[in-house]
Amino acid sequence: MATAITATGATRRDAVRPLRRLGRIALILTALAFLGLFIALPLVLVFLQAFASGWQAYIAALTEPDAVAAIKLTLITAAIAVPLNTAFGLVASWAITKFEFRGKSFLITLIDLPFSVSPVISGLVFVLMFGLQGWLGPWLKANDLQIIFAVPGIVLATMFVTFPFVARELIPIMQEQGNLEEEAAFTLNASGWQTFWRVTLPNVKWALLYGVLLCNARAMGEFGAVSVVSGHVRGLTNTMPLHVEILYNEYNFVAAFAVASLLAMLAIVTLILKALLEWKLAYDRVPAQDHS
């Protein structure tokens, strides 16, 4: 009897295995079809449209003065916003994970705020603060300072939407690592600065690079908040995404897709670096004896 029951169970398992295999294959094919239709295909179409009129038209679209100004402004904005957000992310994550203080939960909430607020709303907030009719508008005008519809407003808006990325990558890593190594450094009379540079920072370097990568990608591709505060002054306050919108609205499709292809290439490079950093983070979490 026992042998018959065992044989029946084995038969059922043998019958179920092909169904499970088919289900797994169907899920994989569905995921690949979704990725191909909504991600890969639009990306391919961007490059096809960008080169529709040949290399000369593509290069001309990228070297046109307004396009060059948009590229420069995008790079300048990222060059300012990313280092500042990196410094903030390091300080905030170190304080949150290594110390107990009043307002800790409030600080974490503030870090997550840009994730829950529309970029357009955040841009509007800066207009209400620094615009001519805003709270600080009359004082700024009296002192001949301009933030809205100028580079400072673009930088502020970009910083707001991107500042959670570094902190949100570092906080879980630092919480997982704990405080034992820092406490050991303090017992050896290491200063707080020495402990940070020689203990804390080396342990989170790959997570830090991962956060900086995501922060930079979002800074260079931000549209909503920057669109509100820029004023769309062609050649002066248009970043690459805004320049793409203007060209597309003017039916200059080749130039629009040419500039968009630069952002697409940035996205591809970001994905490759992201995959490498994720692999490195997973590798570092595996015990050393398992690497062999």
Image (tube, grey):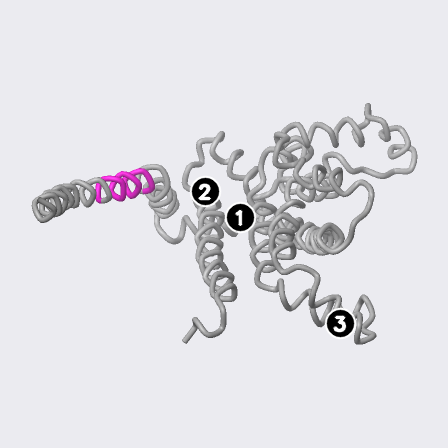
**Compared with residue 131, is residue 191 higher up or lower down, i.e. above or below?**
below
Q: Nearer the viewer, mark 1 or mark 2?
A: 2
Examine the image and state in which quarter residue 255 appears. Answer: top left
Horizontal and vertical percent for residue 160?
69, 40
How far, Cα to Cα, is label 3 from label 2? 56 Å
The residue shown at (85%, 29%) is 137
Q: Which residue bears the numbered disc 1?
A: 64
Q: Which residue bears the numbered disc 3?
A: 185
* Span highlighted in magenta in the image: 25-35
Q: Amino acid at mark 2?
A: Ala
The magenta stretch spans residue 33: yes
Examine the image and state in which quarter residue 237 appears. Answer: top right
Q: In the image shown, does 203 or 130 lie closer to the viewer?
A: 203
**Compared with residue 140, is residue 88 higher up or lower down, i.e. above or below?**
below
The residue shown at (73%, 50%) is 96
Q: In the image shown, does 55 or 202 lie closer to the viewer?
A: 202
- Say the numbered circle drawn on residue 255: 2
Q: Answer with left or right where residue 111 lies relative to residue 288.
A: right
